[in-house]
Image (cartoon, helix red, strand yellow):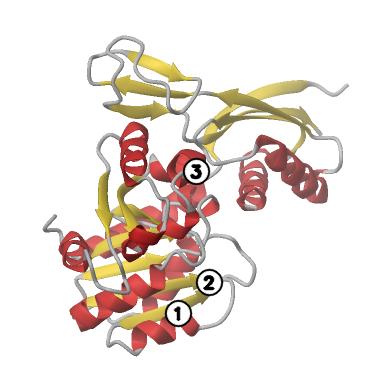
Amino acid sequence: MKSSKKLDIRTSLQERNDQIASENRRLFGRHKLRVFNLIGSPGCGKTSLLEASARVLKNRLAVIEGDVMTTRDADRILAQGSQAVQIQTGGGCHLNAEMVRKSLSDIDFEPVDVLVIENVGNLVCPSTFDLGEAAKVAMISLPEGDEKPVKYPALFVRAELVVINKIDLKPVMDYNLERVRSDCRKLNSAVKVLEVSAKTNEGLDAWIQYLLGNL
Amino acid sequence: MHELSLAYNLKEILLERCGNSTVVEVEIEVGSLSGVIPETLEFCANMVLAETFGDGVRIVLTHKNAMVSCTCGQEYELEDILDPCPLCKGYNRVIIDGTDIILKSVEVESK
């Protein structure tokens, strides 16, 4: 006769990813890198902000680009003088720690102080996969509307910084910045908020100082 | 669609821990801030587990509201993400539970 029993497991379904993320984090520590996981919708301006950052930081910045297809984003960063490695997920909606680990052998860490991992454009799936970063940065932009933080709380409760991009469009958009700031604080009382424009470079200095650990 | 990745993680954990038994039921606790849609996880887990363990695995999902700790000392459950602290009405809090997807238990039959 078959007998059944209940096994107490209590393990996160992210266990394996978390282990690899910890290994990545140790490696980043050995190279004294500040590492950020940049998460935002397609078209919010993640790559444009990193292009502007690359123009300032040059070889002190390295970028891992996550996209479903093409190497276009990595090419844009390389053209500005920083190292860039492209991960193509081939359909996957987020990066995981293993994809990042595999891409690290293509980076020369020697000159690098800051590594930004630009996740696949998506406000949902990337937020719960630890890649080994020191902090998650959530990025939104004015044309997306001012209710993104409360609609996608799983990202905003985990973010250390919220970047609001395309601030140059403020005069022509009905965007309630105060509500966004207030919602962000309600979701995450420790969160920092930065307003930037990757187009006009407004707020770029503060962003660079954040990356370098001076904000 | 990251629920599919999680379903494959579930399969790996089951193979590792219960590979020599017949898996009858898995109980998974889904935190309200885990970023997971329970119905999608159930759909993906059914599909992935059927490949390896056959059709018979029952998937039991339980929901867990996020728990937060307020600087005023109060700990409380978030029914809604924008609920303020019931004691001080503030939002100065840290999340202490409800961000994970946990495989709590597995019921197995010995072969």
Picture layout, residue B108 above or below residue A101: above
Same chain, labels 2 and 1: yes
Q: Chain of mark 1?
A: A
The picture quadrant where one finds residue A108 is bottom left
Instruction: Check the image and report above or below for A43 versus B110.
Output: below
User: Left or right of B26: which side holds B66?
Assistant: left
Residue A195 screen position, x and y as percent: 27, 57
Q: Is residue B37 left or right of residue A183?
A: right
Q: Quadrant of the N terminus of chain A?
A: top right
Residue at the left extreme?
Answer: A214
The answer to whether residue A186 of the structure is visible from this angle is yes
Q: Are marks 1 and 3 on the same chain?
A: yes
What's under tag 3, amino acid-wise? Tyr
**Residue type for callout 1:** Asp
- A205 vs B27, nearest the viewer: A205
Name the one closer to the observer, A158 or A2. A158
Q: How many marks?
A: 3
Residue A84 image offset from top left, x and y in percent: 37, 81
Q: Looking at this rendering, what residue extends furthest in the bottom direction?
A: A79
Label 1 sits on a secondary structure element that is helix
Asked if marks 3 and 2 fall on the same chain, the answer is: yes
Task: Say what amino acid the circle numbered 2 marks.
Answer: Asp
Residue occupying the point 22% across, 61% down: A29
Q: Which mark is residue A152?
A: 3
Name the residue tied to disc 2: A67
